[in-house]
Amino acid sequence: MRSILYLLAVILIIGWLLGFFVYSASGLIHILLVLAIVSLLLGLIRRGADV
C-alpha cells in the first residue's frame, strides 16, 4: 500500500510541476499539490504505525 501512495504522490507532483510551468490552470495545480502532500504524509504516518 505504501508504494501505491508514493507512486500517486510522485505522479501528482510531476503533474503539478508540468501544470505550473506549462499551463495556467492555477486552481487545479494547487489541488494536485495538496493531494500529493497528503499522500506523502499518509505514507509517513502509516510507516510509523507499522514499526
Image (cartoon, rainbow, N blue to C red):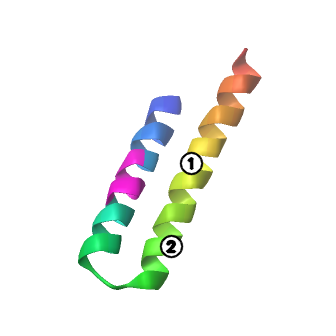
In this orientation, which residue lies closer to the viewer: 43 or 16? Answer: 16
- Say whether residue 18 is left or right of residue 28: left
Task: Look at the numbered discs 2 and 1 and tell me whether their residues touch, using CB distance below 8 Å.
Answer: no
Quadrant containing the C terminus in the rendered view: top right
Mark 2 vs mark 1, foreground winner is 2
- Say whether residue 32 is left or right of residue 42: left
- Residue 17 in percent (x, y) is at 34, 62
Magenta part of the protein: which range? 10-14
Any magenta on residue 33? Answer: no
Q: Is residue 1 visible in this depiction of the protein?
A: no
- The amino acid pointed to by label 2 is His
- Residue 30 in percent (x, y) is at 50, 73
- Residue 16 in percent (x, y) is at 38, 64
- Say whether residue 34 is left or right of residue 15: right
Vertical comparison of 38 with 32: above or below: above
> Helix, strand, or loop for circle 1?
helix
Q: Is residue 12 visible in this depiction of the protein?
A: yes
Q: Residue sitting at 24 percent across and 75 percent down?
A: 22
Q: Which residue is mark 2?
A: 30
Q: Main secondary structure of the magenta part?
A: helix
Q: Earlier in the sequence, mark 2 or mark 1?
A: 2
Q: Residue sitting at 57 percent across and 53 percent down?
A: 37
Dividing the picture into quadrants, the one containing residue 12 is bottom left
Q: Which residue is mark 1?
A: 39
Vertical comparison of 21 with 2: above or below: below
Give me the C-alpha separation between circle 2 and circle 1. Answer: 14 Å
Q: Residue sitting at 43 percent across and 83 percent down?
A: 26
Q: Residue sitting at 35 percent across and 51 percent down?
A: 11
Query: Crowding at label 1, few (<14), some or many (≥20) Cα neighbours within 10 Å?
Result: many
In this figure, what is the number of numbered marks?
A: 2
Q: Which mark is residue 31?
A: none
- The amino acid pointed to by label 1 is Ser
